Image (cartoon, rainbow, N blue to C red):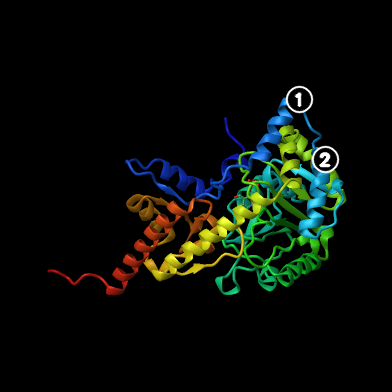
Amino acid sequence: MRLSPVATDVPRSGIRSFGDRAEGIAGPEPVIRLELGDPDFTTPAHISDAAARAVREGHTGYAKSSGVAELKGALADKLRARNGVAVAPEQVVITNGGTQALYLALLATLTPGDEVLVPDPGFPGYRTMAAAAGGVPVPYRLDPGDGFVPDAGAVAALVTDRTRVLLINSPGNPTGAVFPAAALQALLDLAEERDLWVVSDEVYDEMTFGRGHVSALALDHRDRVMSVFSFSKTYAMTGWRLGYLAAPAAAAATLPNLVLATVSCVATPTQLAGVTAVSGPQDAVAEMRAAYRARRDMAVPVLRAAGVPVHVPEGAFYLWIDVSGSGMSDMEFAGRLLEEHRVAVAPGTAFGDAGAGFVRVSLATAAGPLRTGVTRLAGLYAASAAARRAGPPPYAG
Ligand code: PLP
């Protein structure tokens, strides 16, 4: 029997495919895994304890599809205190990770065939989710020369009669760019002029190392903004599947119908753990942020000493590394690094065409293996670049 085009045409993530390849590598020494954005930290104990307590106390039934009221209230408080955004608890919808929030935001705004402007390079999920929601992803380029901050004028040139959504991401994966307020405002002004929804992916909102994060919801024209947040990265809770979306009141009243249609509700004990995560002590968040920053500050000089061009991230937890000077494509470079040096990184083209010649290294790995991994990467780069400079070997006859 035939499957639908939505099922068959949704592309597979290039990062996951590379991870599968890394798992297939045999040998005594383990492969150093730097390709995934999954924190090496475990969830802070007080959060896990809250989930265990919730289960023991019998909070094991369905929750409302919009989410547990206590969590929505705690998140409205968090949005006010940490993001400078005043929203009512009714404007918060609890979702199965940021992933479901993004997917439902697209499902709620797109009519099949509508275009979604997505960053390139950008999180691969945007393209798959837009396609799964019946939309057509249209990439807009993020340039190194602009610090990977989108240029509203260049984005405007891509808007057509079918464009419905502008998807933005700050702090950005894979680039680590944190948008200044003025650049964000220019994008919202464009959305206002061209009557677009803005889906703003802010899942790394608390992972910044210098300039603070500005939420799209804190600026003008917020009546057309849906902002997506997650517990995954902030609290090292990727496997719990807890995220949320803050949206204009009418959208927030409708979105729970889509939660109901897909997962009924997010697991009740997970939501109650979320209340503790967001309302309890935040020391663990500060410690993880400091660790990511220290890893960045350790790894960047290793790469620079070998002449590898690397963008210093201001947020999220990735290094976006230009390996084009090696003379290899990003796929070849990542392939050789894996096969010959046992280090897995994500090839840049997994993030879009503009990722050609780049690889992404995740800082969500302990400092020891991270140092070994980037040292091997730098070694492969330097040797290839030197061989390239020396030119082809003389003809031996
Ligand atoms: N958005 C970005 C930019 C990401 O990097 C990720 C995960 O890596 C997600 C969204 C999805 O995260 P989750 O569904 O775990 O909240």
- Above/below status of 395 relative to 139: below
Location of residue 10 in the rendering, given as x and y in whole percent from the top left corner? 58, 45
Location of the N terminus by quadrant is top right
Location of residue 356 in the rendering, given as x and y in whole percent from the top left corner? 48, 62
Identity, as a three-letter code, of the amino acid under mark 1: Gly
Q: Which residue does the image show at 72% across and 50% down from the upper left?
A: 106
- Above/below status of 64 relative to 296: above
Q: Earlier in the sequence, mark 1 or mark 2?
A: 1
In this rendered view, identify the residue nearer to me: 13 or 131.
13
Q: Which residue does the image show at 69% across and 56% down from the upper left?
A: 202
Identity, as a three-letter code, of the amino acid under mark 2: Glu
Q: Which residue does the image show at 76% across and 28% down from the upper left?
A: 59
Q: Secondary structure at mark 1?
A: loop
Gap between marks 1 and 2, in whole Å? 16 Å
Which numbered marker is on residue 70?
2
Where, by quadrant of the figure, is residue 374 drawn?
bottom left
Location of the C terminus by quadrant is bottom left
Location of residue 176 in the rendering, given as x and y in whole percent from the top left corner? 59, 62
Where, by quadrant of the figure, is residue 187 drawn?
bottom right
Location of residue 34 in the rendering, given as x and y in whole percent from the top left corner? 47, 52
Where, by quadrant of the figure, is residue 196 drawn?
bottom right
> In the picture provided, is 95 more to the left or to the right than 319?
right
In this rendered view, identify the residue nearer to me: 291 or 183.
291
Q: Secondary structure at mark 2?
A: helix
Q: Cβ–Cβ below 8 Å for labels 1 and 2?
A: no
Queried on whether the Cβ of the residue with tag 1 lies below 8 angstroms from ligand 1, the answer reads no
In this rendered view, identify the residue nearer to me: 14 or 211.
211
> In the picture provided, is 74 more to the left or to the right than 203?
right
10 Å neighbourhood of mark 2: few (<14), some, or many (≥20)? some
Residue bearing mark 1? 58
10 Å neighbourhood of mark 1: few (<14), some, or many (≥20)? few
Queried on whether the Cβ of the residue with tag 2 lies below 8 angstroms from ligand 1, the answer reads no
